[in-house]
Image (spheres, grey):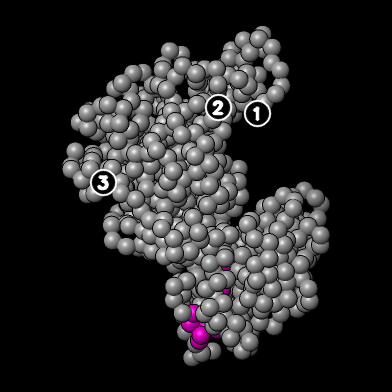
């Protein structure tokens, strides 16, 4: 483990970085380093060629104009599509999630072609923008009970084929019509949750690291980072659950032996 | 916009009632009372803003960062011309403006700080003659629109009201975009430290290129930084490339010198001599408790406010050479924005040689953020506890909006502004 290398590529933070999503890349690198992995963060701006030797590619959120510019640049560049076909991992949040789908909408254009890496389409929302805390029950294969985050998007995303990252308990997620958030496949984790997502859900960061290295990682629970993350998670989940009487259910879920929360 | 009929009697009662409720609210410890008083006024006397501002000269100051300080400096400068009225910091939406006007008495000049999302409504209703626009960057994205749509709204306001004069910091591409069709714009090149929200052209969404001296241009269309009438370099203010004076401000940080330059330019455009305008700017020492140093239980505390990435970056630059402990308070109440993800847009790693103590409702958010940035820190449940963890006799306290107010009230000092230019 200590000898293996791990490279995270942060894709276009100049265009896809509105909601602190670069934190996801920083968190992956740090959690790998704490386990003795030789980890590197490679930041690639939109004027540069994308690095094709990454283990994980991280895409964040952005406004309409930058989102359009990002999809154009990524299509010209071609590397993201290539590494996706080779099975490298992609973590895509918000606008990044929309971009890797088949199509999305901006405030001016209805049907902007995406990169087509995953079978989802995003249409313009007719209702209120989806803004607020997002709490999901994570897809069971992740072995995580709950995912916590904050969403802020207008677009409504429909999964044409495949599975969501989680089932929405509070908030909207992909769209008003169903209770799904994000998308999950062997090498894509996508979500509308920033926060950033991996800060609030360190177990998800570790699952991603395990996908690359194929090993179960040493727990960081007892370290400061683990304690703070656990406190943040608890505080956020409690806030969202409020006084709805579901705290007990929640606690049961959190204390299940096979639900590794940190 | 408001079609409800309001009787003359209700209107007559609105002012006194607002005052009484405001005082009651303040006496009961629910805050300054200004917010509730403004709300009552705006409701009971919906045409009040239009009626009172009719025979006044109104200057509106708006930006993501520096509104309160620049407003205080503009008040100080224009007080050389005539008595000036202003509004309370943070009470910068329509009700706050209504209250400031109600209390304006005989003052004929109003300098009002306006929330960036409310600029259109306030400008239309007050018939403002002047705008001072400094910068736009990401802030409270859960409440305020994304930067581009805000710039578009400002542009629409200015395009539809050709009689408005604007002092515009065109180093910020969004401010140039908003004022590009304005005939009465006074362009100022102040420099622009925060570029993450100006990566694409506001006109055509192609990439923006930055060159020497903060010059920017679009790689596809003809949008580019225009020639500015005023520029500001190494604390010297230039008009048409000739030096007209040095900006000395009583507040720390390059960003405050920039705010001072803008306020001085407003005065100069109003007919003051550069000397008089610059002197008035230099007299502002503390603004609504910001940059204030307080002695408290043997500690010397400097209180600062930073509430978004651009504001933090400016403060980090200012604090970089310092060795004092840093006490950071983060809340996420309505006035702060509910979303704390912006903490990851701040380069906290530059505090790696400092001791940081975190408090606030969202102390775990900032604590975890600092852990990932590898910054030595502690997380404690209250501001008082944070102070007891300070090593040495000095510290810097930085809070976002409500955390700053909480800290100031614990120190039993006001974070209310010096109204009527009491500077």
Q: Residue at x 46, y 74 (%)?
A: A44
Q: Are marks 2 and 3 on the same chain?
A: yes
Residue A255 showing in the rendered view: no
Residue indicated by mark 2: B125
Left or right of B380: which side holds A133? Answer: right
In the rendered structure, does residue A51 fall within the stretch colored magenta?
yes
Q: Residue at x 34, y 43 (%)?
A: B187
Disc 1: CA contacts within 10 A as few (<14), some (14-19) or many (>=20): few
Disc 2 sits on a residue from what chain?
B
Left or right of A245: which side holds B78? Answer: left
Q: Is the C-beta separation of discs 2 and 1 under 8 Å?
A: yes
* Magenta extent: A50-60
| Main SS category, magenta section | loop
Residue A213 is marked as none
Disc 2: CA contacts within 10 A as few (<14), some (14-19) or many (>=20): some
Q: Nearer the viewer, residue A196 or A161?
A: A161
Residue indicated by mark 3: B232
Location of residue B225 with respect to A44 vertically, above or below: above
Q: Is the C-beta separation of discs 3 and 1 under 8 Å?
A: no
Location of residue B54 with respect to B177 vertically, above or below: above
Q: Residue at x 58, y 85 (%)?
A: A83
* Quarter of the image with the N terminus of chain B in it: top right
Q: Nearer the viewer, residue A135 or A46?
A: A46
């Amino acid at each position: 483990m200590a000898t293996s290398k791990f490279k995270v590529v942060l894709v276009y933070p100049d265009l896809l970085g509105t909601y602190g999503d670069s934190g996801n890349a920083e968190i992956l690198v740090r959690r790998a380093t704490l386990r003795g992995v030789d980890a590197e963060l490679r930041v690639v701006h939109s004027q540069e060629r994308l690095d094709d030797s990454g283990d994980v590619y991280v895409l964040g959120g952005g406004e309409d104009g930058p989102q359009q510019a990002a999809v154009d640049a990524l299509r010209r560049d071609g590397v993201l599509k290539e590494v996706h076909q080779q099975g490298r991992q992609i973590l895509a949040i918000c606008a990044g999630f929309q971009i890797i789908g088949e199509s999305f909408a901006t405030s001016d254009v209805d049907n902007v072609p995406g990169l087509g890496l995953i079978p989802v389409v995003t249409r313009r929302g007719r209702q209120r923008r989806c803004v607020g805390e997002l709490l999901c029950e994570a897809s069971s294969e992740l072995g995580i009970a709950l995912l916590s985050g904050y969403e802020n998007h207008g677009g409504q995303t429909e999964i044409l084929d495949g599975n969501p990252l989680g089932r929405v308990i509070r908030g909207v997620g992909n769209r008003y019509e169903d209770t799904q958030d994000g998308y999950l496949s062997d090498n894509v984790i996508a979500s509308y949750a920033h926060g950033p997502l991996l800060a609030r859900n360190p177990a998800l960061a570790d699952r991603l690291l395990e996908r690359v290295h194929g090993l179960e990682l040493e727990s960081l629970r007892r370290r400061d980072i683990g304690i703070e993350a656990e406190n943040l998670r608890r505080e956020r989940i409690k806030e969202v659950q409020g006084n709805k009487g579901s705290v007990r259910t929640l606690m049961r879920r959190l204390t299940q032996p096979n639900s590794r929360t940190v | 916009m408001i079609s409800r009929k309001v009787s003359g009697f209700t209107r007559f009662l609105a002012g006194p009632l607002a005052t009484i409720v405001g005082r009651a609210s303040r006496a009961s410890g629910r805050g300054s009372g200004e917010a509730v008083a403004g709300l009552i006024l705006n409701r009971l006397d919906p045409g009040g803003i239009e009626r009172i501002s009719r025979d006044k000269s109104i200057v509106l100051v708006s930006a993501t960062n520096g509104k309160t300080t620049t407003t205080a400096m503009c008040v100080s400068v224009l007080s050389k011309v005539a008595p000036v009225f202003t509004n309370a910091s943070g009470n910068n939406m329509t009700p706050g403006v209504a209250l400031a006007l109600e209390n304006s008495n005989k003052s004929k000049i109003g300098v009002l700080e306006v929330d960036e999302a409310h600029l259109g409504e306030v400008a239309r209703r007050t018939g403002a003659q002047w705008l001072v626009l400094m910068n736009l960057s990401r802030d409270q994205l859960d409440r305020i629109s994304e930067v581009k749509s805000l710039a578009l709204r400002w542009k629409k306001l200015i395009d539809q009201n050709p009689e408005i004069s604007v002092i515009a910091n065109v180093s910020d591409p969004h401010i140039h975009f908003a004022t590009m069709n304005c005939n009465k714009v006074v362009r100022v090149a102040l420099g622009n430290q925060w570029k993450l929200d100006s990566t694409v052209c506001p006109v055509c969404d192609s990439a923006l290129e930055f060159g020497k001296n903060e010059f920017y241009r679009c790689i596809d269309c003809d949008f580019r930084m225009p020639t500015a009438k005023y520029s500001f370099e190494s604390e010297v203010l230039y008009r048409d490339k000739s030096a007209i004076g040095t900006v000395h401000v009583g507040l720390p940080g390059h960003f405050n010198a920039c705010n001072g330059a803008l306020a001085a330019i407003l005065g100069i455009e109003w007919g003051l001599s550069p000397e008089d305008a610059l002197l008035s700017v230099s007299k502002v020492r503390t603004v609504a408790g910001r940059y204030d140093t307080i002695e408290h239980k043997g500690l010397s505390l400097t209180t600062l406010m930073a509430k978004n990435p651009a504001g933090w970056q400016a403060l980090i630059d200012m604090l970089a050479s310092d060795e004092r402990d840093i006490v950071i308070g983060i809340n996420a109440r309505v006035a702060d924005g509910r979303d704390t993800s912006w903490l990851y847009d701040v380069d906290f790693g530059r505090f790696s040689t400092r001791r940081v103590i975190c408090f606030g409702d969202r102390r775990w958010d900032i604590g975890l953020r600092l852990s990932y940035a590898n910054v030595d820190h502690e997380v404690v449940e209250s501001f008082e506890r944070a102070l007891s963890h300070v090593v040495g006799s000095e510290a810097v306290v930085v809070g976002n909006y409500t955390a700053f107010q909480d800290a100031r009230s614990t120190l039993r000092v006001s974070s209310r502004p010096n109204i009527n230019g009491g500077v």
